[in-house]
Image: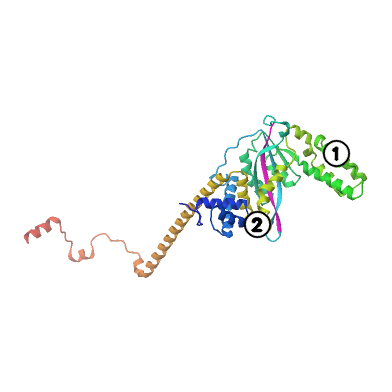
Amino acid sequence: MELPSTALLPHAYQSLVRLGTHLPFAQVVKELQALLDICISEATVRRCTLHTGVIAEAIQTEQAHPQQTRPRFPLPLATPNEQMVMGSDGGMVPLKGGVWAEVKTAVFAQVVTETASKSASEKGKTHDHSYFSRLTDAHTFADLASAEIARRGITIAKSVCAIQDGAEWLQGFVDGHRCDAVRILDFAHAAEYLGRVAEQGELAGQHVPKGWLTVMLHELKHHGPTRIMKHLAWWQKHRPLPSVSDALRYFGKRLAQMDYPQFQAQGWPIGSGMVESANKVVMQARLKGAGMHWEPGNVNPMLALRGEMCNERWEESWQHQQRWCKDQRHMQRRQQSEEKRARCAQELRVRIVHICLRLPSSTFAPQPAPRKGRTEGQKRWGRQTFSRHVLQEGSAKK
């Protein structure tokens, strides 16, 4: 019946894993007791949920490298869209031992075009989001995210924009998958640098005009960074501050990514709110609860399950997991059969050796080839021929 290794039936087992993907393991024990009247330990909930997460992670890794393995779980054909948007960011997750590690998250979505928008306010908004998260380095993350990128049709879309902050690994991520994407610096990230300038100026006792920050943000959003750079250059010359130097250096490398009027005219969003919400929905909602500290090896299995849940592909993923388990059982039985065959062959060879060791040595001596001609008896008594007719006549005389 292909039942799981626990004492639970398939529906109860899937309910356990699904609740473990949403809630802390201790709360899953109470929910199973209340909903299905099943008494189970917290350790069993943790073991079953993480075991399923390991399988989900392995399937997603196999889909990301179809050229290396036989494509058992092919991705559905992507539907090309006119405008697609992608964004990436990192969030910190607490590990055991008081260590914090960065979980990288990528989000992909469609942009509401002019033909699809019902009002002017909806222009530039995104919908149909999907997510991918992993605790790994930037290069490996880019490779593993290729499955979700291919599934969403990022590589074949007519035009793509990438909204993100100025981290170097984010630029490499975009270069590896869609080098011609429109690069947009998150407007909130740029506003943060300007806010630091105003804050440090007030703390240093310098005169900051009232509403200076609001005016600068309006200018940046509707007219671009030209006037902003002039203000910062004047401030650096007459009122030098560390925040002003940081803003000039940061903006100077990313002026092409701050042409917000043109981006808005083309229908692109200028804020990375979808990436910030992705960190909260996928990672923080489950992995950053009160008092939680994770083993490093348990983070990615949980992120794999969270991704399937947030992408609304739970049923598809569950079917793939059942097939994976079936294939693993088949491979295990085949391996055991081969091992048993090899073991039997080895035992047979050992028995043959033992039998040969008990026989006299003359048994294994080479025997002389039979000689042609008369035998020794024939030489001694002469050749005697006894045909069938002679024997019948002799018996008749008797």
Q: Are marks 2 and 1 in contact (CB under 8 Å)?
A: no
How many marks do you count on the picture? 2
Q: Quadrant of residue 358?
A: bottom left
Q: Is residue 186 visible?
A: yes
Q: Is residue 88 visible?
A: no
Residue 386 place in picture, x, y as percent: 15, 59
Q: Which of labels 2 and 1 is toward the front?
A: 1
Which residue is farthest left? 397
Residue 100 or residue 396, whichever sits in front = 100
97 sits to left or right of 28: right
Q: Residues within 10 Å of mark 1 (few under 14, many from 20)?
A: few
Labels 2 and 1: the sequence-earlier one: 1
Q: Is residue 108 magenta?
A: yes
Secondary structure under badge 1? helix
Residue 98 or residue 136, whichever sits in front = 98
331 sits to left or right of 397: right
- Labelled disc at residue 296: 2
Which residues are drawn in magenta?
99-113
The residue tagged 1 is 215
Secondary structure under badge 2? helix
248 sits to left or right of 348: right
Residue 74 place in picture, x, y as percent: 55, 42
Which residue is farthest top? 115
Q: Is residue 51 magenta?
A: no
Instruction: Tell me the kind of residue under disc 1.
Output: Val
Q: Quadrant of the C terminus?
A: bottom left
Instruction: Tell me the kind of residue under disc 2.
Output: Pro
15 sits to left or right of 370: right
- Labelled disc at residue 303: none
The residues bearing labels 2 and 1 have C-alpha atoms spaced at a distance of 46 Å
Residue 163 place in picture, x, y as percent: 73, 41
